[in-house]
Image: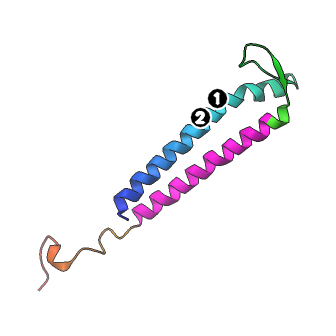
Amino acid sequence: MSDIRLIMIGAAIIFAGFMVGGIANSTYSQFAVQQQNFGECYDYSSGVEIHVKCSEKSQVHLLYLGLSLGLLGIGGVVIFKGIRGKWDHDVKDSEMLGPKNP
């Protein structure tokens, strides 16, 4: 695969990691605040308060955090492989520009 393609794919994977982290954090930040301040968690998304377990919401939040960090790590590795690619190693002698050594 081309080196530029790897860099572009890595950037897209990192972007997806930030999106997953941002969406998950915005959804579960209310439960973290409720757990810290009150010790009980309520879900208000349906318009009526529903008692939910704080530990389950924390576990789901940690799974999303792990997914986000995993995507960021994979994207970083893919970009690193793209940067460390064979940029100058695959150029043929006849295609090289510049002065030729006698």
User: In this view of the protein, which residue sits in the foreground, 43 or 73?
Assistant: 43
SS at mark 2?
Answer: helix
Q: Mark 1 to mark 2: distance in Å?
A: 6 Å
State the image coordinates of residue 5 (x, y, percent, origin top left).
Answer: 37, 57
**Magenta-drawn stretch contains 60:** yes
State whether residue 49 is above or below residue 62: above
Determine the main secondary structure of the stretch shown in magenta: helix
- Can you tell which mark lies on residue 36? none
Q: In what quadrant of the picture does the C terminus appear? A: bottom left
Residue 93 image offset from top left, x and y in percent: 18, 79
Q: Which residue is mark 2?
A: 22
The kind of residue on which mark 2 rests is Gly
Number of numbered tags placed on the structure image: 2
| Front position in the image: 67 or 37 | 67
Please report the bounds of the magenta region as a residue range: 57-84
Q: Residue at x 12, y 79 (%)?
A: 100
Density class for disc 1 (Cα within 10 Å; few <14, some 14-19, many ≥20) is few
Mark seen at residue 26: 1
Residue under the image location 54 percent in, 38 percent down: 19
Task: Determine if the magenta segment contains residue 91.
Answer: no
- The residue tagged with tag 1: helix, strand or loop? helix
Quadrant location, the N terminus: bottom left
Residue, far right: 39
Is 86 on the left or on the right of 101, as rendered? right
User: Can you say whether 60 is above or below 80 in the image?
Assistant: above
Mark 1 touches mark 2? (CB < 8 Å): yes
- Locate residue 18, reporting x and y percent: 55, 40
| Residue under the image location 29 percent in, 74 percent down | 90
- Residue kind at label 1, given as amino acid type: Ser
